Amino acid sequence: LIVFSSEAYKNLVVEKYIPTKEKENIIKKSLVIPFGINEFWLKNSYQRKPIKITDRNLKILYVGKINKNKNIELTAKVCQRLIEKNINIQFSVVGECNDNDLKERLMKYKFLNIYPYSSLESILNYYRENDIFIMPSIYESFGLVYAEALSQSLPIIYTKGQGFDGHFPNGFVGCAVDSSSEDELEEAIRYVINNYENLSINAYNSRMKFSWESVARTVLEMI
């Protein structure tokens, strides 16, 4: 049995490293089991009240390392495009940044605020105070923050063909996008706005997939 943390990672490994004649055999032996998240997020899971996202300013969140790979600039550029189309946006970026040039570029966006990564309780509040979690990383092995966001019934936008992609059908808890496409990201944000209530409910109802108890049960069933 071969275990992968995501469907996207399994596909990448099989396509890139497995000889053609062995691919079918390896796929038959493969199982996708996600990583679990800290029990804190599940004990403090949160189902937000149904809202129409267009009734107020759109609050977008990113949590994690602030570097080029996380593609925060792409999100900022798309936010700017939407603001120019009369959608009010606030973008909160939570994390540590060791790239001063990147930080300076991000700080030029007036709607964007950078906050230091702190306690889990503080991060919990950021998740609850925002409407969409966006992390269109260029490369991502899994991305635990996506699952953390789901525990707070936050719809997510993630990278197509990387890390988290494949755990859910596209459009179920959020959207997968090409990490190089401003157009796809803009379209995904609009999709989330227009389908917010269902996405939020699906996000909350999907949270237990990432409990370590669920992960352990799946592993034991395979033994």
Image (spheres, rainbow, N blue to C red):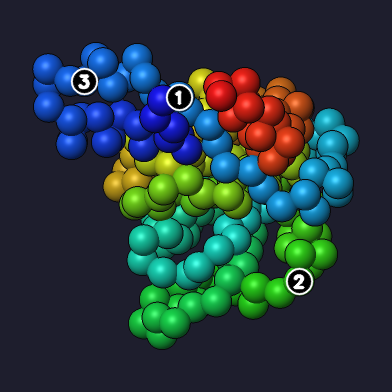
> Crowding at label 3, few (<14), some or many (≥20) Cα neighbours within 10 Å?
some
> Crowding at label 1, few (<14), some or many (≥20) Cα neighbours within 10 Å?
some
Instruction: Single out the mark in the foreground, 2 or 3.
Output: 3
Q: Closer to the camera, 215 or 152?
A: 215
In which quadrant is the C terminus drawn?
top right
Amino acid under disc 2: Ser
Residue where numbered disc 1 is placed: 31
Q: Residue 210 placed where, x, y %?
A: 66, 37
Residue where numbered disc 3 is placed: 23
Q: Tags 3 and 1 in contact by the CB under 8 Å rule?
A: no
> Crowding at label 2, few (<14), some or many (≥20) Cα neighbours within 10 Å?
few
Element on which disc 1 rests: strand
Give the mark nearest the N terminus, 3 or 1.
3
Measure the alpha-carbon separation of dots 2 and 1.
Answer: 34 Å
- x 67%, y 48%: residue: 37
Measure the alpha-carbon separation of dots 3 and 1.
Answer: 14 Å
- x 55%, y 36%: residue: 34
Element on which disc 2 rests: loop
Q: Closer to the camera, 165 or 53?
A: 165
Q: Residue 108 placed where, x, y %?
A: 47, 76
Q: Tags 2 and 1 in contact by the CB under 8 Å rule?
A: no
Q: Is residue 56 visible?
A: no
